[in-house]
């Protein structure tokens, strides 16, 4: 059985594979789309990466990731915004190199509290201001910014935008083709307001991406790697996928798993398991 | 300098001390109030524990904890409710034994998803039904049930009630002297709706307890022990304490810290450090 036509393999799931290997494995597995990461792209350089993507015949579903723009210090904030502008350029180039149906979507993770800073509301305001500062660049490059709500587990150190409602509050200040949201089951599955906020995201046409992976217990020692293959944890994927579908999302669905055991496995095997778990559990 | 008169030392902070030791250390440190746990009470038996509490001259600020009533299986659910009823009895006896100003407050942690069950909304409904089933017992014993919202980090395996809004949605169905909420900074600090929900809790007179401890990073390998002494992490205590005060809460404030290094330290030293950190950081 061939993989689902809307499945996209996010590179983070096979983290130790370099870009040519990741493209090769994705194609060989019969998966039509890939979610790229900036680090493996940078390893080969942007123009080489774009040529590799074009050769692969794969769609590009997103570029992960930029953001991390909550610094209170002006100089650090400018450095972060400049890096985000480079990421916008990269997104445009890679999506243009991808097959028809590629999405010029740049995933934004807000970043955490600056060292010693306990003012969470103000950090959230700075994240919002940073998105505003990037909108003109995104429009010029025809790139869509996708704000990713990040599980409250990471509010201190990774992402101060904790809920889909917060991400939408920011996104809806801008045109929908310029700023949307990325919905990752791992980050939002617990949210009692999830159904109504996915409906809202649909009404305002904000769903720029949908990522799946499972919430596993007990949490592994490194909470950053606390993600599992679909079916191994507690998330009710069919219900969330149905909400996403009802909200009008028709794009690729990425599987993005940070998990040491999965990273340590053979990446081709992981790609195969991913395709099977996607069919069995995601509820498309 | 003597400890703050509203400080209560929750027994979990000095977990390896038995009940007589915990009472002794609390009093010797000059702390006037203690938050009790059921396990060390059970070790000596309820009537002995009550006599020890009476002898100590300390106030009792709460009993931790009951709840864990999200089982889908009827038999398991009945067992859980029976255990909660015993906890109500214990709460009444211990609070009656405590000094004037003791609070007959039983802390309820909802419990997680049953094994293999991915229906989070239904588990939340069962938690609500379980509270309803306990209300008459609480009224008869003059005990106040305090629903504790639990960080979304634990939604799968510890507590399906994730936000203060959810806890209030349940509590507000019952008289305010029978069902309230317990607000623990660790569990709620990330919530973008925290200020408005604390105001709401004040308006409906629902704040049955306030617990403080810090959110530290990186998260320790055991996420259950990811709590720090106030001042060691990212939480803005003065702002939250001010909200709690504005909401009319005048009761004891418990310090409850699950942290292996703190448990491994000398409990008398920990009690002293707790009193100092409380003065320095909590913002009373």
Image (tube, coloured by chain):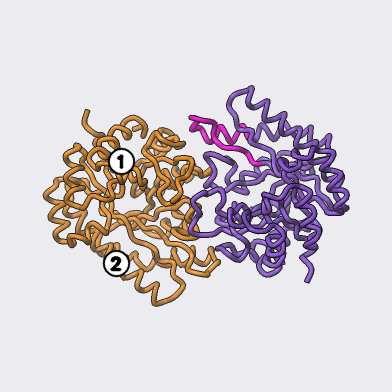
Chain colours: A orange, B purple
Mark 2, Cα crowd under 10 Å, few <14 / some 14-19 / many 20+, is some
| Marked residue nearer the N-terminal end (1 or 2) | 2
Residue A213 screen position, x and y as percent: 38, 42
Q: Which mark is residue A250?
A: 1
Residue B272 horizontal side relative to residue A235, left or right: right
Tell me the tag on residue A85.
2
- On the rendered structure, is A146 left or right of B55? left
Q: State whether residue B77 is above or below residue A149.
A: above
Q: CA distance from mark 1 to mark 2?
A: 27 Å
Q: Is residue A149 left or right of residue A38?
A: right
Query: Percent from the top left, x then y, of residue B4?
Result: 77, 65
Residue drawn at point x = 29 percent, y = 54 percent? A105
Horizontal relation, residue B88 to residue B236: left or right: right
The chain letter under disc 2 is: A
- Magenta region includes residue B118: yes
**Residue drawn at the location 81% of the way across and 58% of the way down:** B27
Quarter of the rendering occupied by the C terminus of chain A: top left
**Magenta range:** B109-127
Image quarter where the N terminus of chain A lies is top left
Q: Which chain does tag 1 point to?
A: A
Q: Quadrant of residue B73?
A: top right
Question: x, y percentage for residue B147?
Answer: 68, 43
- Residue at figure coordinates x 65%, y 35% from the top left: B128
Say which residue appears at 67% left-offset and 32% top-offset: B130
Name the front one of labels 1 and 2: 2
Q: Is residue A191 magenta?
A: no
């Amino acid at each position: 059985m061939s993989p689902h036509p809307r499945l996209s393999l996010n590179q983070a799931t096979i983290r130790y594979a370099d870009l040519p290997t990741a493209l090769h494995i994705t194609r060989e597995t019969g998966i039509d789309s890939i979610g790229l990461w900036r680090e493996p792209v940078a390893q080969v350089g942007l123009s080489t990466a774009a040529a590799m993507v074009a050769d692969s015949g794969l769609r590009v579903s997103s570029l992960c990731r930029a953001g991390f723009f909550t610094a209170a210090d002006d100089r650090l904030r400018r450095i972060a915004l400049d890096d985000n502008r480079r990421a916008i350029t990269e997104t445009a180039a890679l999506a243009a190199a991808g097959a028809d149906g590629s999405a010029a979507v740049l995933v934004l993770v807000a970043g955490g509290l600056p060292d010693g800073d306990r003012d969470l509301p103000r950090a959230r305001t700075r994240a919002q201001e940073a998105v505003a500062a990037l909108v003109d660049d995104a429009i010029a490059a025809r790139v869509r910014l996708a704000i990713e709500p990040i599980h409250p587990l990471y509010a201190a150190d990774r992402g101060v935008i904790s809920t889909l409602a917060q991400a939408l509050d920011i996104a809806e200040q801008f045109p929908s083709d310029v700023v949307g949201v990325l919905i990752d089951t791992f980050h939002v599955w617990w949210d009692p307001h999830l159904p109504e906020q996915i409906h809202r995201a649909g009404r305002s046409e904000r769903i720029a991406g949908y990522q799946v992976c499972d919430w596993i217990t007990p949490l592994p020692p490194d909470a950053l790697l606390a993600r599992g293959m679909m079916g191994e944890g507690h998330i009710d994927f069919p219900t969330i996928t149905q909400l996403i579908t009802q909200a009008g999302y028709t794009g690729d669905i990425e599987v993005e798993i940070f998990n040491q055991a999965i990273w340590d496995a053979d990446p081709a095997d992981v790609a195969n398991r991913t395709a099977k778990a996607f069919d069995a559990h995601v509820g498309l």
